[in-house]
Image: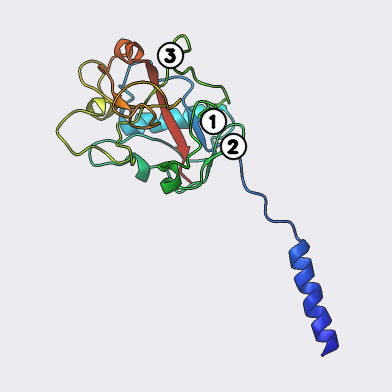
Amino acid sequence: MKFAALTAFAVAFACLAMPAAAQDTSLSFFITSVGSGDGANLGGLDGADAHCQKLAAAAGAGSNTWRAYLSAKGVNARDRIGNGPWHNAKGVQVAMNVDDLHSENTKLGKENSLTEMGKMVNGRGDSPNQHDILTGSQLDGSAFTDDADHTCGDWTKNGEGSAQVGHHDRQGGGQNPTSWNSAHGSRGCSQANLVGTGGNGYFYCFAAN
């Protein structure tokens, strides 16, 4: 009996002494360092995903499956990006899961919403301001259901239309100025119009696996 008790104690002590498994803090979230160069024409969702994958591969994270945080007709951005958690290029966890990402607990903001290379993106007050990030999404990460164009023709237009954008620095104007994913609509879909309203055609990428 005594031997059995001592053995059980030793096993329990050994388990407590074992270090917890280290969390993977490798790159799993970023803002694209460059856009398509053709305004909001990203080649649709497939083209946007491919752009995320290409940039991630250049940063050494190409083994993950990357998805653009973009909504389209009948497609919710929040349903495309996996389950989390997600970390930026400096290992900072920006959200634990999808609900956390769309809550006030999210750590997204100018200091943490970095490019794939760990660079900070210009925000309000910088020259030029590039804080408008394409999303086409509502505050909860879902697609709009009205008849208006919120996605520049499901990311195929570079002229007329509009795209819903968020403010990565969580400040500025619009209906929801502090929202990272749904601050206001863009003036149009061309590169010039995106730049003119404080953006550069950037979007968010998440590791979905």
- Circle 3 — which element? loop
Q: Is residue 44 left or right of residue 31?
A: left
Contact flag, marks 2 and 1 (Cβ < 8 Å): yes
State the CA–CA distance, disc 2 to disc 1. Answer: 7 Å
* Residue underneath mark 3: 129
* Residue underneath mark 2: 92
Residue 187's quadrant in the figure? top left
Residue 167's quadrant in the figure? top left
Label 1 is placed on what type of residue? Answer: Asn
Q: Vertically, is 11 above or below 70?
A: below
Q: Is residue 36 visible?
A: no
Q: Earlier in the sequence, mark 2 or mark 1?
A: 2
Percent of width and height locating residue 30:
50, 31
The residue at the point 19 percent across, 39 percent down is 145
The residue at the point 74 percent across, 64 percent down is 16
Label 3 is placed on what type of residue? Answer: Asn
Q: Tell me the crowding category of disc 3: few under 14, some 14 to 19, or many 20 or more residues within 10 angstroms, Cα based.
A: some
Q: Nearer the viewer, residue 60 or 9?
A: 9
- Circle 2 — which element? loop
* Residue underneath mark 1: 112
- Circle 1 — which element? loop
Q: Earlier in the sequence, mark 3 or mark 1?
A: 1
Q: Nearer the viewer, residue 40 or 162?
A: 162
State the CA–CA distance, disc 3 to disc 1. Answer: 17 Å
Label 2 is placed on what type of residue? Answer: Val
Q: Tell me the crowding category of disc 1: few under 14, some 14 to 19, or many 20 or more residues within 10 angstroms, Cα based.
A: many
Q: Is residue 196 left or right of residue 22?
A: left
Contact flag, marks 3 and 1 (Cβ < 8 Å): no
State the CA–CA distance, disc 3 to disc 2. Answer: 24 Å
Percent of width and height locating residue 89:
58, 31
Which disc, if any, is residue 143? none
Q: Vertically, is 178 above or below 79?
A: above
